[in-house]
Image: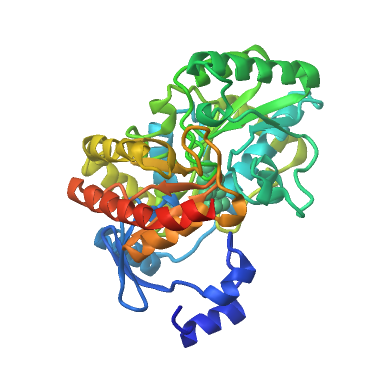
Amino acid sequence: MSPLTNAQTRDIETLIHPYTNLDAHRNTGPTILESGKGIYVQDSQGKQYIEGMAGLWCTSLGYGNEELIETAREQLSRLSFTHLFGGKSHDPAIALAEKLKEISPAPASKIFFSSSGSEANDTQIKLAWYYNNARGLTEKKKIISRLRGYHGVTIATASLTGLPANHADFDLPIDGILHTACPHHYRNAEAGESGDDFSTRIANELDEMIQREDPDTIAAFFAEPVMGAGGVVVPPESYFAKIQGVLAKYDILFIVDEVICGFGRTGEMFGSQTFDLKPDTVSVAKAITSAYSPLGAITVSEDVYQAMLDESRKIGSFGHGFTYSGHPLSTAIGLKTLEIYERDNIIGHVKSVAPVFQSRLAALSSHPLVGEARGVGLLGAVELVADKTSKTPFDPKIGAAAHASRLCEEEGLITRAIFGDALAFCPPLIITEAQVNDMFDALERGLNRSLDALKTAA
Ligand SMILES: Cc1ncc(COP(=O)(O)O)c(C=O)c1O
């Protein structure tokens, strides 16, 4: 390993890195990125990479988009900040809220802005509680999410998140958050169980959980159309229809977390459309601005809005909001991003390159390290296993996916090692067919190079 540079040493002595083994980081140091153009980024040593993760599932229009840069410059020159508190407003927030209402897969009466997906989902929980208090249903407060779901890192949203590292030693989850089964057929189905039978079984388990807890105590159910950080879990075809059937029986809000799937990732504008979901409300973030500025949002239905009006009359104000709710820079960029998605037919583009992406991905199922290759649209993952036939995972101490991800980086491709030794791919949506092939060529080289080391370690 080459000696650490001055900038790497300064990093180690100053920064706390999210989702990083802080101890190992002291030896390896950071990869410092300096510039980006299109689907490529460059590090401080001048090495170029395909950004195969679109940052963190977010830079849909890639890097160096001049229209977004110019929109940011214009907005900052005209009005760098105004908030939405106490009835202040500004045009980009109004116009983006109008646009989101128009395209939302949930019945949207109003839009509330945050700066992140966590804040959006945190607001969803607060509104579910607020709504039920307004309706006099003061016991109807528990929230159900799924094992391996990812909804953020605030105290409440990390509690929803169903991943062990988000709970361990943080004293989470908080009371009132329940986790139900993850719809991962490859890992969780019983021997010989079809996708449909598996879905029936876990929908029945959800029903039993609700009855056991008492339906009058359950406010909402959270789900991502495709679980992202939990392993890129694409549910069996009939799963959501069965889950929605259960929720409908008990007056439980269906909150769909579109933070990764929203804005074209799965081949439709929203994952809700790809999987035929009927959400009561959705949370969005990430690709809403193609990550040129932080922004999150939730839709508010007319019923919930009417309850909020009642509460405002009673309490005197809606007591929630962030300094940067609807920040002019972020909302102006969001508006321009959505305009570009529409004008350049980004969904059509995703539909045209996704078949190549999915066929190269599917071909990896025969790789000796790959237990399952799965995905939809321009989203995918391979799950690495020590033994393909028995599906035996690698010992987590080996860090198999992290090892393969490092070798892919050496081959010029950024991927991400996520839960369950899966390696995730989520390139910018502007990726071309030729670049998809380059990406999978680099991935194959990385996996092939990992083979010997990982088979020996296993
Ligand atoms: C599905 C989903 N929801 C919520 C979040 C949290 O968003 P943020 O990191 O912006 O708080 C993420 C982040 O990756 C996510 O993938």
Q: Residue furthest left?
A: 434
Q: Position of residue 36 (x, y in %)?
A: 31, 66
* Residue 174 % position (x, y): 78, 43
Q: Position of residue 176 (x, y in %)?
A: 78, 35
The residue at 37%/69% (across/down) is: 77
Q: Nearer the viewer, residue 3 or 295?
A: 3
Looking at the image, residue 79 lies above or below residue 358: below
Instruction: Report the side of 343 relative to 276 (left or right).
Output: left
Residue depicted at x 27% and y 60%? 65
Residue 9 visible in the current orientation? yes
Lateral position of residue 136 relative to residue 205, left or right: right
Report the front residue among 399 and 183: 399
The image shows residue 332, relative to residue 64, as above or below, that is above
Quadrant for residue 181, please give it.
top right
Above/below status of 241 relative to 358: above
User: Furthest-front residue in view?
Assistant: 456
In percent of the image, x 57 and y 14: which residue is there? Answer: 200
Residue farthest toward the bottom in the current orientation of the protein: 6
Residue name at image x 57 percent, y 56 percent? 398
| Left or right: 372, with 429 as reference point | right
How is the model colour-coded? rainbow
Residue 423: x percent and y percent? Answer: 45, 48
User: Toward the viewer: 42 or 270?
Assistant: 42
* In-image side of 383 versus 14 (left or right): left
Q: How many marks?
A: 0
On the image, which quarter does residue 223 sit in? top right
The answer to whether any part of residue 61 appears in the image is no
